[in-house]
Image: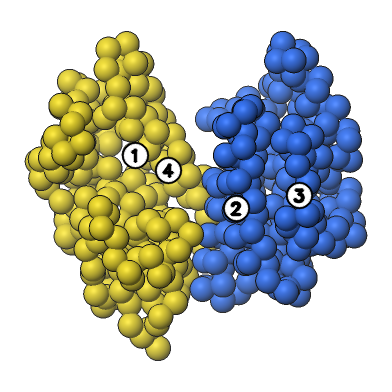
Chain colours: A yellow, B blue
Amino acid sequence: MAGEVVLLSTKMSMYGMRANIALIEKGVKFEYKEEDLTNKSPLLLQYNPIHKKIPVLIHNGKSVSESLVIVEYIDEFWNDRAPLLPSDPYERAQARFWANFVDNKASEVLRKIRTTKGGELEAAKKEFFETFKQLEAVLGDKPYFGGDTFGFVDAALIGFYSWFYVYETFGNFKIEAECPKIIAWAKRCMQRESVSISLPDQKVVYEFVLGLRKKFGLD
Amino acid sequence: MAGEVVLLSTKMSMYGMRANIALIEKGVKFEYKEEDLTNKSPLLLQYNPIHKKIPVLIHNGKSVSESLVIVEYIDEFWNDRAPLLPSDPYERAQARFWANFVDNKASEVLRKIRTTKGGELEAAKKEFFETFKQLEAVLGDKPYFGGDTFGFVDAALIGFYSWFYVYETFGNFKIEAECPKIIAWAKRCMQRESVSISLPDQKVVYEFVLGLRKKFGLD
């Protein structure tokens, strides 16, 4: 019995998008509940009392938190279809390594691009291209990080694509010129229903970020 | 075929200890190679070109990096004995959540205790006890985080125990008074050969840290 599945998330979160994508890839019926992070719901506080962060997956009344942990859980519970992680232990380890790389290295670089100026921003841009060129090298000539099929690293990374216009605008640079493979990969992912449904439009994300900056007096 | 197994690590690294413990728990024969992090070996640079960090597991010439990824790999490759992760997807997700908690929350708190003074140190100590009380609540009355058997979260956390004397001395506090269950758990783990072999003596770690601080002019 698959039972009741609820996802607590926010539309703009690249971490929340991962869980949304994985559920759609698996064909799981679920209820999506949008959280207001400035006024967290009792449900969020109840089901993720440790971090009080989205995304949270509630499955038959039991919760799973941390986006990559959620994606692995979805992959393991609904293990009869659309595998996200490969079956070979070594390949699984490589997928986990690169998903961690996205979480640590790529997230940090992208945060710097949004929040720095001047010399720091220039250094962040250099680091951005180094990081994404490393990812391009891993992708190689494969259609997906998962090989011929959309997988764990694809689900981990693709949400950032919806923020690319934000990074390009704040950083005053173009990603495609330096990382054409990443853009081609992202566009390929966007042809999947799971991804196109889960990712907001890049301009909508940009307006959201502008709104946040105004609200917190950063502009 | 299990083939040739080499672990690149340093004796003082709580992250390296995880891999060492997992290999011994599984009864895997392996060659341990101590790395000098001030003069990294060509082997380390070759096998972890992305992060250039220990631990690295080299198995039949292929490498796995990131300590928790290594432990999961060991658990999945040698899956016929001493399971570290539970078999149930929900329980697996919980184990991964708490191992991540150790990596993010606990590691960060412990770093603060080693590197701060005054009011910042007092705040770090408060956070330390909050964090370890959360871990005590998860442990509950079970002998191990893994339940009746030593598991993934146990392997992830126990290495920090070898640094407890460092934290207590720098922080001028006693852990056992506030977190007796964690200390009882750690002593229980220390009765396992895998752990007692892998963890250096607490005083040796303290001397090591003093040496580092002297070398970098921090004292």
Disc 2 to disc 1, C-alpha distance: 44 Å
- Is the residue marked by circle 4 packed among few (<14), some (14-19), or many (20+) residues within 10 Å? some
Whether residues under marks 3 and 4 lie with C-beta atoms below 8 angstroms apart, the answer is no
Q: Which residue is mark 3?
A: B175
- Is residue A121 shown left or right of residue B101? left
Q: Which subunit holds the residue at mark 4?
A: A
**Amino acid type assigned to the residue bearing label 3 in the image:** Ile
| On screen, residue A186 above or below B179 | above
Disc 1 residue type (three-letter):
Asp
Q: How many other residues sit within 10 Å of disc 1, few (<14), some (14-19) or many (≥20)?
A: few
Circle on res. B131 = 2
Q: Residue at x 74, y 32 (%)?
A: B170
**Drawn side of residue A33 relative to residue B29, left or right:** left
For disc 2, the chain is: B
Which one is earlier in the sequence, the residue at label 2 or at label 3? 2
Q: How many marks?
A: 4
Q: Secondary structure at mark 3?
A: helix
Q: Which residue is mark 1?
A: A141
Q: Position of residue B19 (x, y in %)?
A: 72, 48
- Separation of residues labelled 3 and 4 (CA atoms): 32 Å
